[in-house]
Amino acid sequence: MRGELLARDDTTPKLVLSVLGGGTSVVTHHQRTAHLRPGDLVFYSSTAPYRVTFPHGTTRHSLIIRLGDLGLPGRLLTEVSARPFGPGDPLARLLSSILLQLASVAARLRGPDREAAEEPAISLTRALLTSLAADHTAADALTRPANRRLTIRGTAHRWGFADQAHFTREFRKHFGMTPTQSRNHPSGSQLPVDALSVDESRHLST
């Protein structure tokens, strides 16, 4: 847990990325709560209070990155905090795999060797967050050619929906078609939009 005082006094702002190896965990940050399952990746920063809970027997592996090393806007880092990235996202899956490999050798690495081993994870973190920045909405994420390998489930998790079924229901209500139909629609996300009553609707369109 990191309280308001420690967050305010943070002299070197950092981003924590953590992958859940087994068990369950809950991360609360920026008034958002993520319920993690094995294989899920989550981000949270040292510049705002956060709370991480996990029962006995849970395994999780984390990497701390100086925010200055990422060179990304603070708004984006706030947006991705406490949002689970599941195995359905190719970049998140690769990043999780690297973190798990790092965890198995980190204790034996020192100085330059450790920095070299962590560099791929830092580069992938930057790529994943930059990709998210290009997708202003979930509909954008579905129709952008660069995301063709991102599954519907991965898109749902990336944009903060509880699961794929929830995402599909809200997407159909919003656009009158399923996410799969939208991905194959010639006009992409440029579809009629009705008002939504759920909070997650803000992630469907702007």
Image (cartoon, rainbow, N blue to C red):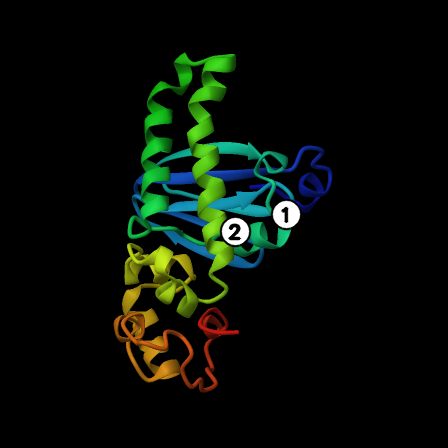
Where in the figure is residue 133, as x and y percent of width and height? 51, 55
Looking at the image, is 165 positioned above or below residue 106?
Answer: below
Pick whichever, 53 or 41, lies toward us. Answer: 41
Q: Are marks 1 and 2 in contact (CB under 8 Å)?
A: yes
| Residue at which label 2 appears | 81
| Residue at which label 1 appears | 48
Pick whichever, 52 or 96, lies toward us. Answer: 96
Q: What residue is drawn where x is 35% and y is 32%?
A: 98
Characterize the local packing of mark 1: few (<14), some (14-19) or many (20 or more) Cα atoms within 10 angstroms: some
Q: What residue is drawn where x is 46% and y is 74%?
A: 201
- Horizontally, residue 14 falls left or right of residue 41, namely right
Looking at the image, is 203 positioned above or below residue 133?
Answer: below
Q: Helix or strand or loop: what does disc 1 sit on? A: loop
Looking at the image, is 16 positioned above or below residue 190?
Answer: above
Query: How many numbered circles are shown?
Result: 2
How far is disc 1 from disc 2 in space, using C-alphas?
10 Å
Quadrant where the N terminus is found in the figure = top right
Q: Earlier in the sequence, mark 1 or mark 2?
A: 1
- Horizontally, residue 155 falls left or right of residue 116, namely left
